[in-house]
Image (cartoon, rainbow, N blue to C red):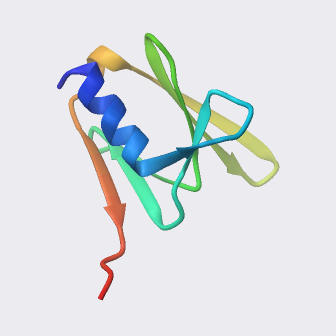
């Protein structure tokens, strides 16, 4: 999958954080990269060479880094509107 396509998927699932280059997942939207962990209430940073996903776990912050060229799939998960 091309980087530009992946960027569009991440942009669809998130919204910009004012005053930063980061993006917050939209309310009710979760993402999963390469059938790995499902992220909810995460902050994304879409760098030139990597994607960083930041989540808070208790009193700690976890940063996970993915190389653009190693990502093969991104799943977006959201509730169905009736």
Front residue (pair 48, 35): 48
Q: Residue at x 72, y 40 (%)?
A: 61
Q: Which one is in front, 9 or 72?
A: 9
Q: Quadrant of residue 63?
A: top right
Instruction: Judge from the rendering whether residue 82 lies leftward or rightward of residue 1; answer left or right.
Output: right
| In the depicted structure, whether residue 23 falls above or below residue 21 | below
Residue occupying the far top of the picture: 49
Q: Is residue 43 above or below residue 77?
A: above
The structure residue drawn at horizontal position 54% and vertical position 64%, both measured from the top left corner, is 27
Assign the C terminus to one quadrant of the image: bottom left
In percent of width and height, residue 60 lies at 77, 43
- Image check: 44 left or right of 7? right
Given the current orientation, which residue lies at the most extreme front position?
18
Judge from the rendering whether residue 39 lies leftward or rightward of residue 42; answer left or right: left
In percent of width and height, residue 31 lies at 39, 50
- Residue 7, image x and y in percent? 35, 30
- The single residue placed furthest to the left in the displayed view is 1
Tell me what residue is drawn at x 76 percent, y 54 percent.
58
Judged left or right of residue 65, residue 74 is: left
Q: Quadrant of the N terminus?
A: top left
Image location (x, y in percent) of residue 44: 54, 36
The structure residue drawn at horizontal position 34% and vertical position 19%, both measured from the top left corner, is 68
Query: What residue occupies the far right of the structure in this picture?
Result: 59
Q: How many marks?
A: 0
């Amino acid at each position: 999958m091309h980087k530009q396509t992946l960027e569009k998927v991440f942009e669809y699932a998130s919204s910009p954080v004012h005053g930063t280059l980061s993006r917050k997942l939209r309310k009710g939207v979760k993402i999963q990269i390469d059938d790995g962990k499902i992220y909810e209430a995460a902050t994304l940073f879409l760098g030139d060479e990597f994607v960083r996903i930041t989540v808070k776990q208790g009193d700690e912050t976890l940063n996970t880094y993915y190389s653009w060229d190693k990502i093969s799939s991104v799943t977006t998960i959201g509730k169905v509107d009736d």
